[in-house]
Image: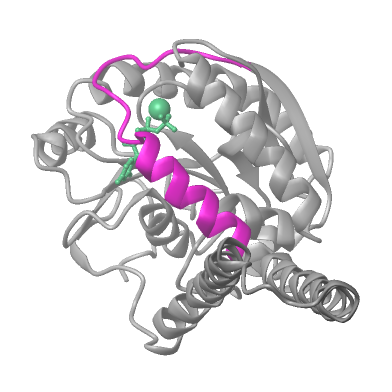
Amino acid sequence: MTSPPELTVVIAAFNEEAALPLLHPRLRAVLDGLDLATCVLYVDDGSRDRTWDVLGELAASDPRVARLRLSRNFGKEAALTAGLDRVHAGAALILDADGQDPPELITEFVARWREGWDDVHGTRLERAGEGWFKRASAHAFYRVIGRLSRTPIPRDTGDFRLLSRRALDGLAQLHERQRFMKGLFAWVGYRQLSVPYHRAPRLAGRSQFGFWQLWNFALEGITGFSTVPLRVAMYLGLLTAMLAFAFGLFTIAKTLLWGDPVRGYPTLATLIVFLGGVQLIALGVIGEYLGRLYLEVKQRPLYLVDDWQPAAGASGDRT
Ligand code: UDP
Ligand code: MG
């Protein structure tokens, strides 16, 4: 295989020493069955276990394997960006390292891509091995973002997808620091196709995404793809002001009609607390956006590379 790869499988791995040796043979079998020049690019996202060495062993036994190591743990979104940045030719396919995305589906993705689709993504039919809470919160998240964002983000769709060359080139033009990948993929557009699949439980290890990470992820998605919350804050302020005005009129009328025996302390206290609360909420919403603006303006790189071992079998890519 001396030609540049026509398809590169990009896999972000963080502490996946147990899952990788189980996943790679399956992936290899699938890629062998394709009539394409392929490459597998593993991104070690600053793992603290033996992931990098395990990848070295895989590379020694399979010339198709390239491995990239980041200087620390930057998170899955940055790791995927690092991987995709190294796909200079051909299409790319994104796969989870834990086997939750079945590599066997790649054959179908490739067939669809050859039919002319630019973004072939797997949509989960169900979520085996995930608790009711994660399922319910994921459901709520897709509903909320579906209503707030002008970019339609497909439901129950993760990063498992095949991107054509032009979709990758489009993605490369989105330089934002806060990378909500699902949203970025959707923003790129072109011809998108959902392929339903059954999402398997992890092969080994545990998920890195707990409640707090998922909450932050949801905030990232909503603030990155919608300014509706800012507008809601404005309407909330408007509504409160109108209510306060009506209440003022009511108080004046009441005083004129029945005089003013000094009372109304509870009303006053309630109003002050209520208004304070509304203002803090609005400030918080502004703060969310301002914080992101701040991070964006600093223009830091998305990740730093510690080590890069290109595939023995791929050529011309020694950046
Ligand atoms: N991952 C990563 N960096 C991180 C966390 C996760 O590269 O900081 C990788 C992880 O190795 C896996 C994928 O992202 O290949 C999905 O992670 P996980 O299975 O923990 O997420 P879930 O499937 O629960 O959404
Ligand atoms: Mg997983």
Ligand 2 shown in quarter: top left
Residue pictured at 17% horizontal, 35% vertical: 60
In the image, the segment drawn in magenta is 198-223
Residue pictured at 34% horizontal, 45% vertical: 313
Residue 139 place in picture, x, y as percent: 65, 30
Which quadrant would the C terminus be assigned to in this image? bottom left
- In the displayed structure, does residue 238 sit left or right of residue 4? right
Residue 219 highlighted magenta (yes or no) = yes
Q: How is the image coloured?
A: one colour
Q: Is residue 160 visible?
A: yes
Which quadrant would the N terminus be assigned to in this image? top left
Residue 148 place in picture, x, y as percent: 76, 56
Total marks in image = 0
Residue pictured at 52% horizontal, 55% vertical: 219
- In the displayed structure, does residue 312 sit left or right of residue 242? left
Residue pictured at 62% horizontal, 57% vertical: 222
Who is closer to the viewer here, 150 or 240? 240
- In the displayed structure, does residue 217 sit left or right of residue 145? left
Residue 63 place in picture, x, y as percent: 29, 38
Q: Is residue 40 visible?
A: no
In the rendered image, the vertical position of residue 282 relative to residue 180, given as above or below: below
Residue 207 highlighted magenta (yes or no) = yes
